[in-house]
């Protein structure tokens, strides 16, 4: 894998100084050549070489938003104007999942792709994945960038890569067991579904050699209850979380010393954490993650509002912070990605995030799958949680009562819990879409007699 000039991580101050050098280098390359960035920076009075320090950049450079990128691609189809090179220089096309609107298309040059793979390699290194491992990729290969980066980064590190595309869940299970896979890459939801299917088919995961389950795409990997559920279902495996985005690439890796804590790859990204409402720095408090890609020069982003809510261990601008227990100085995010700014639902004055709901439900091993319905009734927002029991659930009414009580304790809210027939809720290979909006008509499901 090609090397790149990344900032030093010997101390927080060294890291910040190196980021400024990388930022100057990035601006020097994109200001004269990238139409999208040139327009925006000229309007802000920013020229290459004019920055005094990182704070000067934060003060003068404008935020970039997803709607702004979508508008640019509509006005300059099909790829937009955020391109530093002629189109002939680009060799990769990927796109966002499009869960909240029209997908964004993203192009990369070979140089930028190598930089992305270098970031993904940090995920494997932190997870203690070595050349002795066999990595199974349990997903179909489409335009989503994560598949390709995970596979090619593993290949570049000399790992044996086993593709699982174009196969049924049972076929993938056979491949994992028969080929002796030691690392599994997929979403938390799909890892649970694989385990569920193994039980249904009488396939013993106790003979699996999987020792690492690297997950992303959902917050479950950093939710203790979901991690525990996964590790119980896959004996001998440890769950390793990370996250990234099509627009920016692989952003975090899990702390080797503290599960549930993600380190931001600050050798590749300039990070800020802001108050989502005001845009001001959050000063070490929970807030929205903002990223600048320091090495993706072919399609760069400056101060991109990711929409991800995070809780930093210390403020990104800190220079004298002590290293983490793992010895790293890079920014640590406690609890991983807490949620999305646009995913929060306000129910009777209480802020409810999908990850918080999952943290409650995954405490109950009798729940095979769940769905959350959002209903707007008379100007009020209400939630209804549907739970699908496992085949061995002996007391369905008791399960519903216990989940109801857990929601009351967690949110101080009455959240209706409905049981639904076995195998009636959808299963997901990629990002799970468990939250649905619907009208006020009662659902076609049954509620058990509570007695």
Image: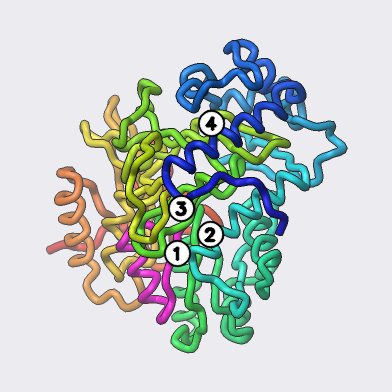
Residue range of the region highlighted in magenta in the rendering: 222-242
The image shows residue 7, relative to residue 328, as above or below, that is above
The image shows residue 211, relative to residue 222, as above or below, that is below
Measuring 65% from the left and 70% from the top, which residue is drawn there? 164
Query: With 194 as the anchor, is 230 left or right in this view?
Result: left
Q: Which mark is residue 442?
A: none
**Residue linked to disc 3:** 218
Query: With 413 as the anchor, is 199 left or right in this view?
Result: right
Badge 2: residue crowd in 10 Å (few <14, some 14–19, many ≥20): many
Q: Are marks 1 and 4 in contact (CB under 8 Å)?
A: no
Mark 4 or mark 3: name the one nearer the start of the chain.
3
Mark 1 or mark 2: name the one nearer the start of the chain.
2
Q: Are marks 3 and 2 in contact (CB under 8 Å)?
A: no
Which element carries disc 3, helix, strand or loop?
Answer: loop
**Residue linked to disc 1:** 240
Residue 231 inside the magenta-drawn segment: yes
**Residue linked to disc 4:** 304
Task: For the C terminus, give its image quadrant.
Answer: bottom left
The image shows residue 176, relative to residue 70, as above or below, that is below
Viewer-closest of 297 and 97? 297
Q: Are marks 1 and 2 in contact (CB under 8 Å)?
A: yes
Percent x, y for residue 256?
Answer: 41, 64
Q: Which mark is residue 123?
A: 2
Measuring 38% from the left and 29% from the top, which residue is drawn there? 274
């Amino acid at each position: 894998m090609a090397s790149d000039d990344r900032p030093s991580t010997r101390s927080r101050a060294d890291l910040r100084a190196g980021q400024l050098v990388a930022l100057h280098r990035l601006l020097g390359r994109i200001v004269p050549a990238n139409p999208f960035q040139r327009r925006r920076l000229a309007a802000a009075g920013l020229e290459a070489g004019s920055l005094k320090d990182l704070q000067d950049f934060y003060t003068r450079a404008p935020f970039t938003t997803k709607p702004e990128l979508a508008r640019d691609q509509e006005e300059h189809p099909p790829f937009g104007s955020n391109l530093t090179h002629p189109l002939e220089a680009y060799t990769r096309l990927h796109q966002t999942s499009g869960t909240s609107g029209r997908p964004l298309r993203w192009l990369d040059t070979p140089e930028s792709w190598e930089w992305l793979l270098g970031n993904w390699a940090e995920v494997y290194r932190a997870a203690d994945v070595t050349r002795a491992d066999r990595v199974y990729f349990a997903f179909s290969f489409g335009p989503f960038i994560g598949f390709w980066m995970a596979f090619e980064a593993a290949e570049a590190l000399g790992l044996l890569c086993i593709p699982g595309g174009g196969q049924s869940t049972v076929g993938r299970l056979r491949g994992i067991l028969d080929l002796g896979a030691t690392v599994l890459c997929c979403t938390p939801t799909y890892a649970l579904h694989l385990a569920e299917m193994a039980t249904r088919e009488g396939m013993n995961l106790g003979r699996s050699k999987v020792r690492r389950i690297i997950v992303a795409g959902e917050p479950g990997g950093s939710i203790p209850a979901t991690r525990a559920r996964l590790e119980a279902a896959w004996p001998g495996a440890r769950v390793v979380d990370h996250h990234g985005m099509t627009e920016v690439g692989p952003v975090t890796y899990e702390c080797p010393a503290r599960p549930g804590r993600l380190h931001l790859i600050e050798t590749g990204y300039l990070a800020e954490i802001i108050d989502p409402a005001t845009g001001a720095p959050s000063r070490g408090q929970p807030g929205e993650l903002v990223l600048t890609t320091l090495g993706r020069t072919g399609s760069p982003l400056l101060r991109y509002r990711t929409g991800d809510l995070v809780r930093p261990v210390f403020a990104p601008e800190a220079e004298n912070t002590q290293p983490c227990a793992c010895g790293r100085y890079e920014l640590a995010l406690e609890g991983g990605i807490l949620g999305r700014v646009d995913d929060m639902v306000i129910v009777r004055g209480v802020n409810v995030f999908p990850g918080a709901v999952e943290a409650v439900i995954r405490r109950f091993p009798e729940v095979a799958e769940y769905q959350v319905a959002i209903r707007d009734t008379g100007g009020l927002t209400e939630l209804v949680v549907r739970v699908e029991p496992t085949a061995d659930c002996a007391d369905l009414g008791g399960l519903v009562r216990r989940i109801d009580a857990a929601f009351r304790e967690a949110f101080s809210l009455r959240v209706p819990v409905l049981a639904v027939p076995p195998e009636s809720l959808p299963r997901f290979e990629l990002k799970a879409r468990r939250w649905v909006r619907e009208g006020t008509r009662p659902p076609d499901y049954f509620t058990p007699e509570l007695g």
